[in-house]
């Protein structure tokens, strides 16, 4: 009898706390008898899990911050250089991200950003003297990554200015030439371009340029063509490399935009780096004074000094492009809902994101070590080439995987990922193809040259 009254008391308690209105609404959505049967058949463990899930259902999930630097390699920079990195990141987010797709789509360069970039005081970052900051190669790498993370075209423009053009003068110019050009280029008052690649000669430039030069008194006469020359439609000076008809050696020249005989023509209909203004340059009896010949450039090996440095920069660009794609995909997976849930909660999506992050982190650690070697004056051609090969291959994988996560939206420019996919193809190709860079590394590790 006592147990009977206890049961009655328990039922009264349940009925007292029962929300009849909610129960009525629930009965309109589900079969209560069937639901009671399923619940009563559950184990205590499963029932506890269900209750925990129900209690947490009303809470808003706190999403971790998006950060492609999973191992926090940026924190290895000294405090003053870390501040510069974050300053450039802010610039890219504020000034470039809002306009990146617009100018890429129009295939135009946003000229108005040049004075703003100049204010960052980062051109010629690693050079000493001539108004240059003299910072580390490691910081320079991080800045290339920060730019490419938002817009690879801007990173390429900057790499041509500070690496290829300024680097040619810094490493191959006379003291007078350095004094004349580098301070103005550091302030970005003078924009430079770099003319090495030719219509019929890309990776084979070491074997012989078709663009020629011949000395006539105090002048040099240059004839030939250069192709894919970034910045060349609006550059103030272009570094032109040519083969001397007299001694067959490669020589470099500072060709001014008003030099007679130089005709740059914008290359149209590109599918990658559309914001970069590439030109086909025709040089017809272009006369350059001896004073504008790079006085310390007397062979292709002198050109290689510049290319080794910039090839390392391209590896960092590949990291930036991959990081931008990964971070865009990660954000999208939390914003995009399917079947009532963000797709970031799906197992296959998380597996793909982790694969991307693993490759990205491997790339970042490789280029970080590469720049440390550069700062220690230990960087060799094969070191830069291996990084270029590995990072551009992994970059291609990451942008493709990121594109996969966007589904049909991935082909729309507004989601950014289409631009990253397209631009990755240019990074994969320039500064030496995969095959050429592989042969440079292969020669170093085997002792045998496979070049033909």
Image: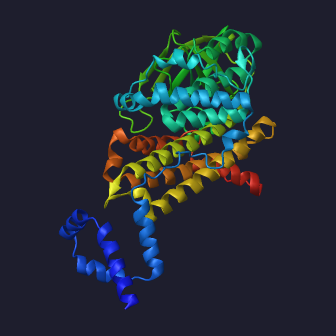
x then y, percent, for residue 54: 40, 65
* Residue for point 60% across, 34% down: 144
Looking at the rendering, which quadrant does residue 295 occupy? top right
Judge left or right: residue 377 versus residue 14: right
Q: How many marks?
A: 0
Judge left or right: residue 190 versus residue 296: left
* Residue for point 24% across, 80% down: 33
Q: Is residue 267 visible?
A: no
User: Relative to the observer, which residue lies in front, 231 or 159?
Assistant: 159
Judge left or right: residue 56 versus residue 361: left
- For the N terminus, the image quarter is bottom left
Task: Identify the colour scheme used.
Answer: rainbow
User: Relative to the observer, which residue lies in front, 341 or 316?
Assistant: 341
x then y, percent, for residue 113: 48, 19
The relative height of residue 225 versus residue 1 in the rendered view (above or below) is: above
Q: Is residue 250 visible?
A: yes
Q: Among all residues in the image, which is located at the extreme front?
A: 1
x then y, percent, for residue 234: 47, 17
x then y, percent, for residue 369: 73, 45
The relative height of residue 307 versus residue 1 in the rendered view (above or below) is: above
Q: Among all residues in the image, which is located at the extreme left?
A: 28
Looking at the rendering, which quadrant does residue 78 occupy? top right
Judge left or right: residue 448 versus residue 270: right
User: Relative to the observer, which residue lies in front, 71 or 358?
Assistant: 71
The relative height of residue 362 versus residue 148 in the rendered view (above or below) is: below
């Amino acid at each position: 009898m006592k147990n009977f009254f206890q049961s009655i008391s328990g039922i009264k308690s349940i009925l007292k706390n029962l929300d009849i209105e909610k129960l009525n609404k629930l009965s309109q959505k589900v079969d209560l008898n069937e639901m009671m049967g399923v619940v009563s058949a559950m184990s205590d463990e499963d029932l506890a899990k269900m209750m925990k899930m129900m209690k947490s259902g009303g809470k808003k999930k706190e999403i971790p911050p998006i950060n492609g630097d999973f191992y926090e390699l940026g924190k290895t920079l000294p405090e003053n250089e870390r501040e510069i990195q974050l300053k450039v990141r802010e610039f890219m987010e504020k000034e470039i991200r809002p306009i990146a797709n617009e100018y890429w789509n129009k295939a135009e360069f946003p000229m108005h950003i040049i004075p703003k970039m100049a204010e960052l005081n980062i051109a010629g970052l690693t050079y000493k003297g001539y108004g240059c900051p003299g910072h580390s190669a490691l910081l320079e790498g991080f800045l290339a990554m920060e730019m490419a993370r938002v817009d690879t075209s801007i990173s390429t423009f900057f790499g041509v200015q500070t690496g290829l053009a300024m680097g040619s003068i810094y490493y191959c110019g006379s003291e007078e030439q350095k004094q004349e050009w580098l301070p103005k280029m550091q302030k970005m008052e003078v924009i430079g371009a770099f003319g090495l690649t030719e219509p019929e000669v890309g990776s084979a430039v070491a074997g012989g340029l078709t663009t020629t030069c011949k000395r006539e008194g105090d002048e040099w006469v240059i004839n030939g063509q250069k192709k894919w020359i970034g910045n060349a439609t609006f550059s103030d000076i272009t570094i032109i490399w040519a083969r001397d008809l007299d001694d067959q050696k490669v020589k470099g020249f500072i060709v001014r935009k008003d030099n007679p005989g130089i005709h740059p023509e914008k290359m149209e209909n590109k599918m990658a780096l559309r914001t970069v203004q590439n030109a086909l340059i025709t040089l017809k009896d272009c006369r350059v004074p001896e004073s504008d010949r790079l006085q310390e450039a007397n062979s292709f090996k002198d050109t290689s000094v510049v290319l080794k440095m910039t090839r390392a920069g391209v590896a960092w660009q590949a990291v930036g492009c991959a990081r931008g794609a990964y971070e865009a995909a990660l954000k999208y997976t939390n914003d995009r809902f399917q079947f009532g849930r963000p797709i970031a909660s799906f197992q296959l999506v998380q597996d793909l994101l982790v694969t991307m992050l693993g490759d990205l982190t491997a790339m970042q650690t490789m280029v970080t070590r590469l720049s440390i070697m550069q700062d220690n004056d230990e960087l060799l051609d094969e070191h830069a080439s291996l990084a270029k090969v590995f990072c551009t291959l992994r970059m291609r994988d990451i942008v493709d995987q990121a594109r996969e996560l966007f589904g049909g939206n991935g082909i729309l420019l507004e989601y950014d990922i289409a631009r990253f996919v397209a631009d990755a193809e240019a990074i994969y190709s320039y500064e030496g193809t995969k095959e050429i860079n592989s042969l440079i590394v292969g020669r170093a590790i085997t002792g045998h040259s496979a070049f033909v």
